[in-house]
Amino acid sequence: QVQVVESGGGLVQPGGSLRLSCAASGGRFGITAMGWYRQAPGQQRELVADISSGGSTNYADSVKGRFTISRDNAKTTVYLQMNSLKLEDTAVYYCNIRKRGASGTRDYWGQGTQVTVSS
């Protein structure tokens, strides 16, 4: 079992910055990817950015050049640095941990953290 705990959301003005953090319990063994998704009201959950076990990163077109995903050396904490925030970045942000185990690959989700961009 993996517990996923997010932190760092809040209220920020357009053009501002926030940093989200996500810690996964249970060690890094078997983790194949760590990422951030978001869901705005009335919208489907969408990928924001992810990072593979090998360090490859992937970003949604809407956040390229503004957001940066990274992780710690232990590879159990993932961060999302969000700069130049826009009104349309307002959403609940969810951390995703993809882990491979004896019974296959499984996704683990955090509880979500609200990011509100407003003037």
Image (cartoon, rainbow, N blue to C red):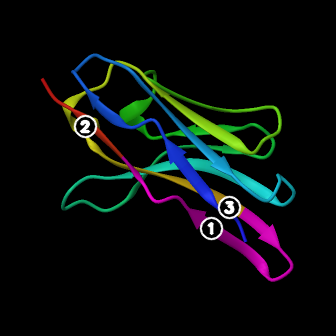
Q: Is residue 46 above or below residue 119?
A: below
Sequence-first tag of 1 and 2: 1
- Local secondary structure at mark 1: strand
Most distant residue in the left direction: 119
Most distant residue in the bottom direction: 103
Verify CB contact (< 8 Å) between mark 3 and mark 2: no
Q: Which mark is residue 116?
A: 2
Query: Given the image, on which type of amino acid does mark 1 rest?
Result: Asp
- Local secondary structure at mark 3: strand
Query: Given the image, on which type of amino acid does mark 3 rest?
Result: Arg
Q: Is residue 115 left or right of residue 118?
A: right
Residue bearing mark 1: 107
Verify CB contact (< 8 Å) between mark 3 and mark 1: yes
Residue bearing mark 3: 98
Image position, residue 103 (x, y; %): 80, 83
Q: Is residue 96 above or below residue 104?
A: above
Q: Nearer the viewer, residue 9 or 104?
A: 9
Q: Is residue 102 above or below residue 30?
A: below
Instruction: Determine which quarter of the picture holds residue 1.
Output: bottom right
